[in-house]
């Protein structure tokens, strides 16, 4: 629970929302908030995890700083550890995934959604996620690219149920209500490609 600058009370468990509301002066604290903001923009989740991970990395680096080791040496050691970790993961821990196998992809997406509040509708959410990414997947120069932020948008239409959620392949335009007997979901016009 936080009090925002306008005096309102904000209740959230979203790490990024909490960090957006606090004001800090320390440069390291500002960097931590920037890490969380970048994580939220790029991935949309995991802001609390990156803060905890960054805090642990700082805790590990502290003894070396107390020994007056230069920060650039510590950073280069962290970079080398990252390269070694990626190589180990690539060679020993990674498993090839067939992206055309929908059942396998569903299991992968469900492992991410299983920790969220929408566990009851996880199958629907996974179907929507897979359909949406399939709609915006581009193949250029033999490289497959999926740019959700650029080509997909989540539009909340009031008055429906979660089970009515779907992926629309086309453009959705907001349309004003022209008659009092007009149904609410009719106020959106869909242009399908």
Image (tube, rainbow, N blue to C red):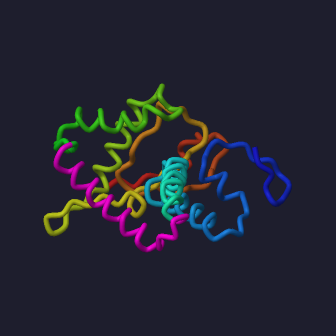
Q: In screen coordinates, is 62 left or right of 112?
A: right
Residue 179: horizontal and vertical position, in percent? 64, 47
Residue found at x 49% / y 59%: 61
Query: Looking at the picture, does residue 168 appear above or below residue 111?
Result: below
Query: Looking at the picture, does residue 156 appear above or below residue 143?
Result: above
Q: Nearer the viewer, residue 13 or 30?
A: 30
Residue 20: horizontal and vertical position, in percent? 66, 59
Q: In screen coordinates, is 179 left or right of 84?
A: right
Q: In screen coordinates, is 59 left or right of 78?
A: right
Name the residue furthest top.
120
- Asked where in the image residue 160 lies, by quadrant, the reply is top right
> What range of the chain is rendered magenta?
65-92
Q: Nearer the viewer, residue 80 or 19?
A: 80
Name the residue furthest front.
67
- Asked where in the image residue 138 lies, by quadrant, the reply is bottom left
Q: Quadrant of the C terminus?
A: bottom left
Residue 96 lies in magenta, yes or no? no
Residue found at x 29% / y 33%: 107
Q: Nearer the viewer, residue 42 or 78?
A: 78
How many marks on residues? 0
Residue 155: horizontal and vertical position, in percent? 51, 50
Q: In screen coordinates, is 3 left or right of 27?
A: right
Residue found at x 34% / y 38%: 109
Residue 97: horizontal and vertical position, in percent? 19, 43
Q: Quadrant of the N terminus?
A: top right
Residue 88 lies in magenta, yes or no? yes
Q: Nearer the viewer, residue 9 or 149?
A: 9
Name the residue furthest left.
142
Residue found at x 40% / y 64%: 150
User: Magenta span: helix, strand or loop, mainly?
Assistant: helix
């Amino acid at each position: 629970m936080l009090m925002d600058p306008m005096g309102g009370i904000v209740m959230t468990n979203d790490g990024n929302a909490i960090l957006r509301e606090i004001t800090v002066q320390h440069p390291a604290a500002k960097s931590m908030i920037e890490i969380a903001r970048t994580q939220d923009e790029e991935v949309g989740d995991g802001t609390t995890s990156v803060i905890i991970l960054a805090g642990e990395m700082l805790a590990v680096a502290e003894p070396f700083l107390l020994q007056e080791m230069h920060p650039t040496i510590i950073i280069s050691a962290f970079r080398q550890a990252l390269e070694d970790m990626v190589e180990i993961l690539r060679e020993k821990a990674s498993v090839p995934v067939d992206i055309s196998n929908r059942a396998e992809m569903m299991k992968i997406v469900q492992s991410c959604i299983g920790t969220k509040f929408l566990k009851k509708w996880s199958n629907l959410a996974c179907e929507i996620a897979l359909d949406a990414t399939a709609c915006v997947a581009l193949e250029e120069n033999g490289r497959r690219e999926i740019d959700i932020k650029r080509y997909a948008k989540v539009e909340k239409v009031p008055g429906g149920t979660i089970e009515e959620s779907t992926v629309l392949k086309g453009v959705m335009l907001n349309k004003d209500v022209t008659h009092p007997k007009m149904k609410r979901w009719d106020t959106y016009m869909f242009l399908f490609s």
